[in-house]
Amino acid sequence: MQNRWSDEDAARAVESYGTEGIQEDLALRVYTTRLLGSEPRLVLHGGGNTSVKSRAVDLTGAELDVLFVKGSGWDMGTIEPPGLPAVQLEPLLALAAMESLTDEDMVNFQRRNLLDSTSPNPSVETLLHAWVPHKFIDHTHANGALVLTDQPDGEAVCRELYGERLAIVPYIMPGFDLAKACKAVADVHPEAEGLVLLKHGLFTFGATAREAYERMIDVVTLAEERIERGLGAPIVSAGWPAMAAPPEAIAPALRGLLANETDATEGRYERFVLDFRTHDAILDYVGAADIGTFSQVGTVTPDHAIRTKPLPVILPHPPVGDLEAWTAAAAESIAEYRKAYVEYFERHNPRYGGGKQMLDTSPRVMLVPGVGLFGAGNSAAAASAAADLAETTVEVIAAAHRMGGFESISEGDLFDIEYWSLEQAKLAGRKEGELARHVVAITGGAGAIGRSTAEAFRARGAEVALLDLGGKALDEASETIGAAAIACDVTDAPSVELALRTVARTFGGLDILVSNAGAAWQGGMADVDDELLRRSFELNFFGHQHAAKSAVGIMREQGTGGALLFNVSKQAVNPGPNFGPYGLPKAATLGLVRQYAIEHGRDGIRSNGVNADRIRSGILTDDMVSERADARGVSESDYMRGNLLGREVLASDVAEAFVALALARKTTGAILTVDGGNVAAALR
């Protein structure tokens, strides 16, 4: 494990934060917390915390002893001073005299003693940090430490390796009882540099930020060296061929199998976003002969169960070219997983007087021999987190088995973590956007309407992929909006198929297609060149057909319906002179909208269009606005507001129309006009 402490960087942190009025203790605490949090072999997705005991001034000017401790929801890799809220230390110390305390009372007490009531909740391990008498305290779930502590004889292995340097604490669920146990062990071992929490992780202490950090690096390095010395024979392969099927081929079907139908009559589903991972170590793991044994024991550290559930599902090896057979076999595996999950819940809920409400039964990690693994979540970020934790699990369990074996905490302990009241409260308070869990692909994504549409869908919680000809505009739109960027030429059917399968590889599938790409060619029909007309049809009609055809293929594989949304044009119903090369393919596209509605309504796929007019974009450029305004003898402003409402229609208005159609669950074959009022373009 590399020591990344830098005197220069530490000094810069103190100087930089000092200009913001942040004291040195807190500045250095932020600096080393970031060092720890940016190393995934130490910390992943909230799986650690840090603190420093210091002094702070309250609103009355009184100077108090405080504990700056990591707050809930902050990422250690990017943390800032507000992510380490100050809690009055003296009241926390007084709690050590109590025999018991509920989690809810503990959290409430900690919040009552914040210096700033707007701060995030202090870590659930705040009392542990307060009661252990050291200034700087670091806590990680280092992979190396987990390999050792997850051995069947993990305690003996750790005692042999660390001697008196680290004191050992048996597994106890985080909270008041763990804090009490750690205090007791630390009191008996005052010279210890830290603690080993069996099946959980490491704590290291220091009088300075550097000392605590470097001790963490040292003890993790010792663990890694011990693992290298103890490695035995590698995992035995079952002999599956690698990459039996590309992930984009099986992901949509898998995503459909994971979805939970919430209203059969309305065709509503609780969907999941997927994140695919593969490399040699993963393929060795998922292809192991005894994968059904060692992958079904539990998590490598308790808190993983909150994001990944206690166990993954093992799916069948996909035969090449037979998606239907694989889907049927995978459906059986997931059905068995769901049944086992219900039984697991029913075994342990009585311990809580039957008061727990069962979470959904969908797995969060899927292991596919010959392919890799998928993480699932309610967003791309959650799916990525599940996949990250699954990769860590692969590394830890594979190494643990080569050392002698892997042993997790008990099933009951896993249930206690997964159904922890504090975590359940977080879930209950979490509000999802109305299009959360949906995947949207937008062609012409780098243009004005495409970008506005992407922003509108992202604002509702959807995951978005922007498809356009590659270039700076696409990259900038992707970065600004937080969407995937995929280079694609919609006039080329294989390019479109590859792009939408890339969406499936990235997010697991596709729920909404916004077929938006287009360009306006002008000319009188008696004079227009056939080649130009064909070019317009390739983009303004066949571009829509290529995208819709590929999208429907993915949606049907998912089996959870979907929406096709087309950017048509008022030219389709109200053609203007010399705009035939543009209007004719758009008229054909209007027919395409309704044809898809007719043919795929029974698949739960809705097909609708938007007819917009006079939108500043790549089609209606500023030069074209000027030309048209001059031809009509009006100002540019009057030209753009030449509708019944007297208002200019913006790209964002078109975007909102697409969103409205995406949400209109019982509307298909419809055209929504967005033009401020143009009677001549009204459908009749």
Image (cartoon, helix red, strand yellow):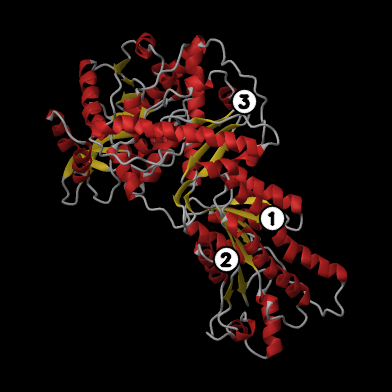
> Considering only order in the chain, which callout, 2 or 1, is on the residue closer to the N terminus?
1
Residue linked to disc 3: 280
Q: Quadrant of residue 636?
A: bottom right
Foreground disc of the pair 3, 1: 1
| Residue 492: image location, x then y, percent | 77, 55
Q: Residues within 10 Å of mark 2 (few under 14, many from 20)?
A: many
Q: Residues within 10 Å of mark 1 (few under 14, many from 20)?
A: some
Separation of residues labelled 1 and 2 (CA atoms)? 17 Å
Q: Residues within 10 Å of mark 3 (few under 14, many from 20)?
A: few
Separation of residues labelled 3 and 1 (CA atoms)? 35 Å
Please, what secondary structure does the residue beneath circle 3 have? helix
**Callout 3 amino acid:** Asp
Label 1 close to label 2 by CB (< 8 Å): no
Q: Is residue 246 above or below residue 261?
A: above
| Residue 346: image location, x then y, percent | 32, 33
Please, what secondary structure does the residue beneath circle 2 have? loop
Note whether residue 303 is visible: no
**Callout 1 amino acid:** Lys
116 displayed left or right of 161: left
| Label drawn at residue 549 | 1
Separation of residues labelled 2 and 3 (CA atoms)? 46 Å
| Label drawn at residue 668 | 2
Q: Nearer the viewer, residue 428 or 119?
A: 428
Q: Nearer the viewer, residue 22 or 500?
A: 500
Q: Nearer the viewer, residue 359 or 538?
A: 359
Foreground disc of the pair 2, 3: 2
| Residue 163: image location, x then y, percent | 34, 10
**Callout 2 amino acid:** Thr
> Considering only order in the chain, which callout, 3 or 2, is on the residue closer to the N terminus?
3
